[in-house]
Each structure stands twice: as C-alpha cells, then as structure tokens.
Amino acid sequence: MGAEQANWNKPDRRKRRIPLLAYLVAFIVVVIGIGWLGVTMFSGESLGPIRGEVFGRSEPVGPTSDDAAEAVRVLLDAVEADKLTLDLLADPGAPEAIASYRLAIEGLLPFEVVGTAGPVVIDEELPDQAFAPVELSWDLGGGVVWETTGTVNLVVQQDEWKVDLDVSLIADGLNNGDKLVRRRIEPNRGSILDRNSAPLVHQVDVVYVGIQPQRVADLADLTAQLAQILGVDADELAVRVEQASPDAFVEVAVLPRSLYDSVRPQIFPLPGTVFREESEQSVVRPGLARAVLGRSGEVTAEIMEANPGVFQIGDVVGRSGLQFAHNAEMVGRPGVAIDVIRKAPDPATTTTGTGLITTSSLVVGSKDEVEQFAVIEPVHGIDIHTTLDMEMQVAADAAVDTTDLNAALVAIQVSTGEIVAVANGPGSNPNNFAMTGQYPPGSISKIVTGYSLMAGGLKTTDPAPCPRNVTVAGREFGNALDGALGQIDFRTAFAQSCNTSFVNLTTDFADDRLHKAGLEFGLGVEVDLGLPAFFGSVPINNGDVDLAAASFGQGRILMSPLAAAIMASTAADGVYRTPRLVTSPGGETDLVAQPLDPTIAAELKMLMRAVVTEGSGNAVAGVPGEPVHGKTGTAEYGQGVPPPTHAWFVGFQGDIAFAVFVESGRFGGTVAAPIAAEFLTAIGSAN
C-alpha cells in the first residue's frame, strides 16, 4: 500500500510532455500564419485595401465599382458645368491634365456639352485601375451637334477612385497636346423656282469691283474710266474714295462673273482697282417680280438677336418677299469641320490660387500638323417651288413698267388657280401692294353684283335705265363724267358700266346678299399663300345708302389686285378655285373648286365679252389670240371735286385671268386696259 501511494505522489514525466508538444506546435502555426499574413499584406501581391479573405469569404474592404461610377458621374457634371477642378483628379499631374484638356477644347468654343457614361470596367490584373466609356454631345450652336465617344480612366488613390484625366475623354484618337479647331462650312442657299423649275432667284458668282485709295495713282483718271466702262457716277465715286481710309475697299460695282470677265481686260490693269469674288443670291434678271421674290442681304443685328447662334456677321439672309418669308427653309444650316493640330508646342500654363488652369491662345506653329478630325456636313437650303411662270412674269413686269404711275398686275391660270405672275411697278419696291393693297374696286365689282342680280332672275335683256343721277335716302349717286344713257337694257348697262343702273336694280337686296355673292367669287376667303395677302372684303351692308354705294364697288368694299384677279378667274369658267403661289415646301392648304351656277356664269361671260366688243374695255379688243373678256373700273377715293380715282381692268383670255390696277390712274378703260393689252400681247407672242 505505501509503495503504491508513493507512486501517485510522483510526477509522471511522460504524460506532461504531450501537452507541451501540442502547445509548441500551435505556437509555431500562429507565428507562421502571422508572418504569411504580413507578407501578403505588404508584398503588393493582393488587392490590399480593395479585397481580402475574411473567414474564407471574399468581401469588399475598399472603394467599389459603384464608387468608380460615381466618380465618373461627378466628372461629367463638372465637364458640363465647365467647373473641372483639381480635387476630382488623380495626383500627380492633375494641373497639367486640366491644361491639356482646356487646350484641346478652346478651339471649339462656344459650345455646350452633355455627357453620358457607360458601365465601369475594373482591370482584372490591376484591380486598382478602371475605365468607363463616355459619349459626349457637343452643341456647337446653330443646330450643329457633334457626337464623340471617349474614355474616362480611373485609379485608386487614398482609398478613393480618382479620374486619371487625359484628352481621350473628349474623343478617342486624341493625344495630350492636341488642339481642336472648328471651321464653318457654308451651306448653299436654296433657289426660288418657277412652275417649270426654271430659277427665278439663284446663287450666282459675282465679283465686287473696288478701289483701295493707297493704290491709286490718278483718282480723276481712274474714276472717269470706271464711269465710262461701268456706268457709275465718277464724281460721287471720287468723293467716297477721298473720304475712305487708305487701306479701305471702296465698292464701285457688283458684277455677275460673266459680265466681269467681259470687262476685266479694261478694269483690271487700272492702278487702284481691287477685286473680291463671292457667291450670292440674286434674281435671274433685274426687276423680276420685284416685291414678290424680294431680296436678300447680309444678316442684320436684329435678325441675329432673334436667332441666337444661328447666324454670324456676313451671312446672307432673306430681307423681303419670298426670300424673307421662306428664309428658314432657304438658308439651310452651316456645317462644321473639326481639325486637330498635332505636335503643337506645350501651352503656357499657370495655376491660380484656386487651382484653376489658364492656357495660352491657340497658335498654329510652322511645324504643327493639321489634319481633319471630324466633319458635320452642312444642311443645304431647299428650293422654293412657286406657281409663277417666268415668261408671264417677265411680260407682267414689262407691262406695269409702261406707266410712270404706281401699277400692279396679277395673273392666274384659270383651270388650276395657280398665280402665274405678280408684278408691282418700280415705285412700289419693296411693298407688294399687288397682293396686300386695299383699294375700292369701283365698277369691276359689278361682276359680283351682276351675277347676284341674274341669280335673282334678272335677264340681260331686261330694262336697266341709266339716268345721270339717282338719290337714295338723301344721298345722290352719279356716273363717271356725269354720263347718262337713258333707257337701256342690262347688257348695255354692264358693258357701259352705268352706276345708276346698278343702284336702281339693287334696292331690294338684303343686307347680306352682296356679301354672300362676294364669297362665291373668293372675296374675303382667306388662303395661306406663303406671303401676306389681302383677299378682299365685301361687308354686310348697313342700310340703303351703304348698299347703293356697294352695288358699283364704292362704300366699304375693298380689293387688292390679287383679290380682283381671283374674282376674274372665277368668272372665267364659273368655278372658284383656291389660289396658290408656293407649292413646295408647304402646299398643305386644301384645294377647293366651288362652282357657280353654270347657266348664270355663262351669261356673265357674255356680259364681260360685251365690255370689250362694245363697251368701255375696247382697248384690248385688238389683242391677238382667243377672245378677251373684261370689266373696267374707275374707283373714287379721297376728297376733291371731282374726287381722285384709281383705274382698274380685270378679265381673262383663254386660261389666263388677270387684274390690272393703276394708283390714281383716273379711268380704267383708258389707263388700266392698255396695260392689260401689253401683257396679253406679250404672252400671246411668247406662245
């Protein structure tokens, strides 16, 4: 027993060695693990702060792809707001990066830019680097937009994604130090064409002939020779040269290229002459459809202000007529060529206290390489297609030029309603009174009154007494020159244009009867012709006196030469057709063909023929070709005894209806009708 108990009290050395060994092994494992972890963390062979192994799972321990996407978004916001600052960018080199960026884009100014980013891509082998594709939309003004695809590079610095900026942000293919410069590409201005697509207004090459004072050897001799060759005023030209600065370009004349070529041998050698070649919009012949086609010229400050970013100084725009009304379609849109200047010297840069960068101005050095980087093609102006007929327009212009008075002529193709000629006399420019004038029509409105009378049952053979005067409600009405024809029939009253006959025949008219009849002839029917126009007005009558005056085209009835031509065209074949002037662009107006009563319309034609064969319109009786039908008009206006009068003559021959108006022309039969004869003779000869 004692020996056995003694053994319990002794330490068992074999058993104690086992736990010590285990402790030793555990200690070695921990030391090795700590060493391995330290080597891994500081050797740079793992993500380090980006990712680590925690309890066997991969979890983010630094900036993520979402953080990178946010950095790109913040960058694009700064680019759009033009507030690119150093704190957004990676160090080192941020100041130089901003300087390169600004150098690259300063030749594009002014612009607005909007950016859109694609998904961020993190480099698998270098997970602290990433990139994102971006699309930038550069609004260069005037409707010109340049779309580019670029790249935003990112790196991790101080546990954040930072933008490693270079000019590839602007567009792929650019390098730091490159400079972009834009050049304007002028569009071709649209032409104005006639119904057969012949040009009325088109782009022509011209040569500006000028004098530079410092080159002049003998001013008196130079101006005398230019006056003889070009027909300019020598004295007026000499004064302008003397008042100009030595290096000025004193304009002498603008010549079509063909005319310049013919006189070049005479004027080019003269000491002091200088020349400038340009392309500009011009009518194909001087004075053609003056106020209708209008004119173009350099853009004004007012037009530039009303259209910001669209035009620049020197641009040609429409100033009046169709060239003004359809300028938006004709002018087109400039294009832009974007060049890149390679291998340019480094920009001079300074860093301000706020971290903003300034760059030197764009300068192309002699060794710089310039190449075209992108082109946004211009959108050329479109042509304006009209219903005007070149030959008829020339004839109309020539006809109104035969009088020194202010005259207008409008011609319409009866079968289509197309306006084939609109002529305003030389004194009207730039006013298009042929379409917009508002004048009392006088006896030409008897076409409407006569139709209404016959629609009410009056026959051409019925009596229509023509006394010198007639009194209605105390107001006296009379005939031109106090004429009187006595007991005549309605045919004679119409042919001889007796006012008192019409006053007596309409006494029982309802107040709206002439108004309704006028609408059947298109008077007061509004149509969009592409230019301002007045389509006449036949108001509802207000009592007996107003009705009596309206019965022969006085009182409150008003017409333009255009409205009168529409009335004549309706009378020609008994159908009102919607008038047209511009067929493209536009032409969406619904075309109406509204017939009159065919039997009464046929009677009206017979009456209008009688005006020519036996009445006041005999000035056109001898015109060659088909029979001419017409109606004269002498319209009182203003004050005086007798009051002054305008002269009218309307009618038709074959498929062409017309209206002639002469302001203060006294009598339609003796002043307006001869102009119609000139026109009809000219178009008859042309055909």
Image (cartoon, rainbow, N blue to C red):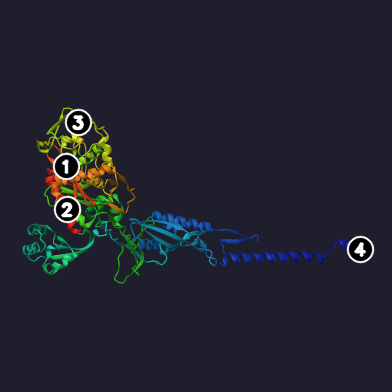
Query: Which one is earlier in the sequence, the residue at label 2 or at label 1?
Result: 1
**Image coords of residue 171 (percent x, y):** 41, 63
Residue at mark 1 to residue at mark 3: CA–CA distance: 24 Å
Q: Please name the amino acid that badge 2 sits on.
A: Phe
Q: Give the labeled residue for mark 2.
A: 679
The residue depicted at 28 percent of the width and 58 percent of the height is 190
Identify residue for label 3.
545
Give the distance between the C-alpha atoms of the residues marked 4 and 1, in whole angstroms.
Answer: 170 Å
Q: For numbered disc 3, what is the local secondary structure?
A: helix
Q: Is residue 585 left or right of residue 479?
A: right
Q: Which residue is mark 4?
A: 3
Given the image, on which type of amino acid does mark 1 rest? Answer: Ala
Does residue 508 appear in this view? Answer: yes
Mark 4 secondary-structure assignment: helix
Tag 1 secondary structure: helix
Q: Residue at x 66, y 65 (%)?
A: 31
Disc nearer the start of the sequence (3/4): 4
**First of labels 3, 2 by sequence position:** 3
Q: Amino acid at mark 4?
A: Ala
For the residues labelled 4 and 2, the Cα–Cα distance comes to: 159 Å
Q: Residues within 10 Å of mark 2 (few under 14, many from 20)?
A: many
The N terminus, quarter of image:
bottom right
Image side of residue 649 versus residue 576, left or right: left
**Front-most of residues 486 and 631:** 486
Q: Secondary structure at mark 2?
A: helix
Residue corresponding to mark 1 = 495
* In this rendering, the label closer to the viewer, 3 or 4: 3
The amino acid type, in three-letter code, at marker 3 is: Val
